[in-house]
Amino acid sequence: MSRFIQRVGDQAEEHDVSKELFLGIMMLMLSLGIMILNVTQPVWRVHRHDPAEGDVVMIYTRSAMGLSRDGYTLTQEMSEWDFRRMVRRLVAEPEVDLHLFVRGGSRETVIKHAMYADSLLSVDQRGKKVRSGVYVHAW
């Protein structure tokens, strides 16, 4: 019993607080570095594709949906049928992308439209995905 107590006492004397302090400071610096990187370049924003010249931009607001030039203002209102006709016309233009901006409109409608447009614009005749032709902007 006395040998055990002596060994515990020896280990207690060898315990170095500076090692724990050093490791604590290193962990703090690592955490701060990750937070700074996350603020300047968010990890979740892996891919952002802004509309190019000639791309079709749709905007969804609480009151209506329609075409837009900048993704913020509605320039021409569209119905469901107008949207479907526009997407079918875009099939003949493979260089043109479709951008859907959510500005208070129904997210379910946007997702439904994105799936419909993606099925026509992003796949070939065999149903194989060949490109990203539809982009949803919800932030």
Image (spheres, helix red, strand yellow):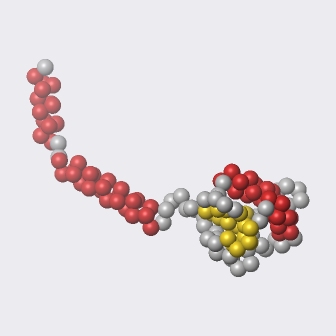
Task: Please name the residue shown 26% across and 51% down the image.
Answer: 24
Q: Is residue 5 visible?
A: yes
Task: Please name the residue shown 75% across and 57% down the image.
Answer: 113
Farthest residue, direction top: 1
Farthest residue, direction bottom: 53
Where residue 62 appears, x then y in whole percent? 64, 59
Task: Please name the residue shown 12% across and 40% down the image.
Answer: 13
Q: Is residue 100 visible?
A: no
Which quadrant of the view contains residue 88? Answer: bottom right
Where residue 55 appears, x then y in whole percent? 73, 74
Which quadrant of the view contains residue 31? Answer: bottom left
Task: Please name the residue shown 13% across and 20% down the image.
Answer: 1
Asked if residue 72 lies left or right of residue 9, the reply is right
Which quadrant of the view contains residue 28? Answer: bottom left
Farthest residue, direction front: 63
Q: Is residue 32 above or below residue 10?
A: below
Asked if residue 6 lies left or right of residue 55, the reply is left
Nearest to the observer: residue 72 or residue 12: 72
- Count of marks placed on residues: 0
**Quadrant that contains the C terminus:** bottom right
Where residue 30 appears, x then y in whole percent? 35, 58
Nearest to the observer: residue 29 or residue 87: 87
Where residue 52 appears, x then y in whole percent? 68, 76
Q: In this view, does 6 lie above or below 114?
A: above
